[in-house]
């Protein structure tokens, strides 16, 4: 089973990495990180904080957008091109196919978040003015390794991106130690973003198992917006909205995943809230993401198994 799931995941990853829309979104994400320098230049003594905050927000926003787009189109593309039929005629169960698609998309998102996070860490590392020469040397070395790897490994260049992105993120996390708390903001935000997009991708996979890409994107976006507003919906004042609306808000906050926990306030990310231990908070958020992903993928597999392709 693992071999079959891995084969589907690798194929999904290869197709997604080559998609032009992904390059466009990556360029937009990197441009947003670079634009944060323009906004930071208008501040006094808060440059690194602004870059870290805007960079973390852009990582989250663009990663969610990528998750929605890939989750909505990956499965449908296989059905539209009818390439799924010869695949399913082999010794491959439909739930294995769903799992492979999911993990392939998740691998793309991991590379996306790592590259975007590494760029933000590189910026604040340079802003900190600590070991600037070392930082520039590491950045140059990473780019050279990537360029040589893409040139030499022509047949497997897409699979080079993920390990390179993870290594780049780790390297930038090390050299940006001079940025202090801002480095922690970016690193923790990247971890929480991966947990959030794991849920968003599973939601998109559920809708794409029975719907079109357009409707899947709309439904997933609606669930995402409700999830991000779960805390607000669960605490609507009855004297302003009425008891009925308040009850509906409470029900929605209980039914839909609370995605607001993946974009906590700055004091939480810095571990400055005495009642909230940051390691426990992050582990709890990751555990919640795993539980939701497992449940949503199980439902997706059931729906996809009962779907008639004729």
Image: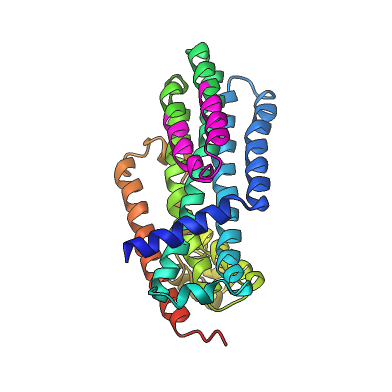
Q: Position of residue 70 (x, y in %)?
A: 58, 59
Q: Nearer the viewer, residue 34 or 103?
A: 103
Please state the extent of the stretch shown in magenta in the rendering: 141-170
- Image-based side of 170 in relation to 207, left or right: left
Quarter of the image holding residue 170?
top left
Q: Residue at image x 54%, y 67%?
A: 223
- Image-based side of 150 in relation to 101, left or right: right
Q: How many marks?
A: 0
Q: Nearer the viewer, residue 216 or 97?
A: 97
Q: Nearer the viewer, residue 9 or 262?
A: 9
Colour pattern of the rendering: rainbow
Q: Nearer the viewer, residue 270 or 56?
A: 56
Q: Position of residue 29 (x, y in %)?
A: 63, 41
Q: Is residue 142 magenta?
A: yes
Q: Is residue 96 magenta?
A: no
Q: Position of residue 21 (x, y in %)?
A: 67, 52
Q: Residue at image x 45%, y 59%?
A: 9
Q: Could you tell me what secondary structure mostly forms the magenta stretch?
A: helix
Q: Residue at image x 47%, y 63%?
A: 101
The answer to whether residue 88 of the structure is visible from this angle is yes
Q: Residue at image x 46%, y 71%?
A: 250
Q: Position of residue 295 (x, y in %)?
A: 37, 70
Quadrant of the rendering where the N terminus is positioned: bottom left
């Amino acid at each position: 089973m693992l071999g079959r799931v891995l084969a589907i995941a690798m194929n999904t990853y290869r197709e997604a990495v080559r998609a032009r829309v992904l390059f466009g979104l990556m360029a937009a994400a990197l441009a947003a990180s670079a634009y944060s320098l323009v906004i930071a230049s208008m501040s006094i003594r808060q440059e690194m904080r602004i870059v870290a905050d805007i960079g973390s927000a852009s990582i989250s926003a663009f990663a969610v957008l990528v998750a929605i787009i890939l989750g909505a189109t990956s499965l449908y593309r296989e059905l539209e091109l009818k390439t799924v039929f010869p695949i399913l005629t082999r010794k491959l169960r439909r739930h294995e196919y769903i799992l492979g698609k999911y993990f392939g998309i998740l691998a793309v998102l991991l590379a996306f978040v790592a590259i975007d996070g590494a760029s933000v860490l590189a910026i604040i590392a340079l802003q900190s003015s600590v070991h600037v020469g070392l930082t520039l040397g590491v950045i140059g070395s990473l780019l050279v390794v990537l360029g040589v790897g893409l040139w030499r490994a022509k047949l497997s260049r897409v699979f080079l991106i993920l390990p390179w992105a993870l290594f780049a993120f780790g390297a930038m996390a090390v050299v940006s130690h001079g940025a202090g708390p801002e480095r922690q903001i970016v690193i923790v935000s990247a971890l929480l973003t991966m947990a959030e997009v794991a849920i968003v991708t599973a939601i998109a996979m559920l809708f794409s198992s029975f719907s079109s890409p357009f409707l899947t994107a709309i439904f997933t976006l609606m669930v995402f917006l409700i999830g991000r507003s779960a805390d607000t919906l669960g605490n609507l004042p009855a004297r302003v909205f009425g008891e009925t609306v308040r009850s509906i808000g409470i029900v929605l906050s209980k039914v839909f995943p609370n995605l607001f926990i993946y974009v906590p306030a700055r004091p939480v990310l810095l571990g400055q809230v005495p009642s909230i231990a940051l390691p426990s908070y992050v582990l709890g958020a990751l555990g919640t993401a795993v539980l939701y992903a497992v449940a949503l993928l199980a439902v997706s597999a059931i729906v996809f198994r009962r779907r008639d392709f004729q």
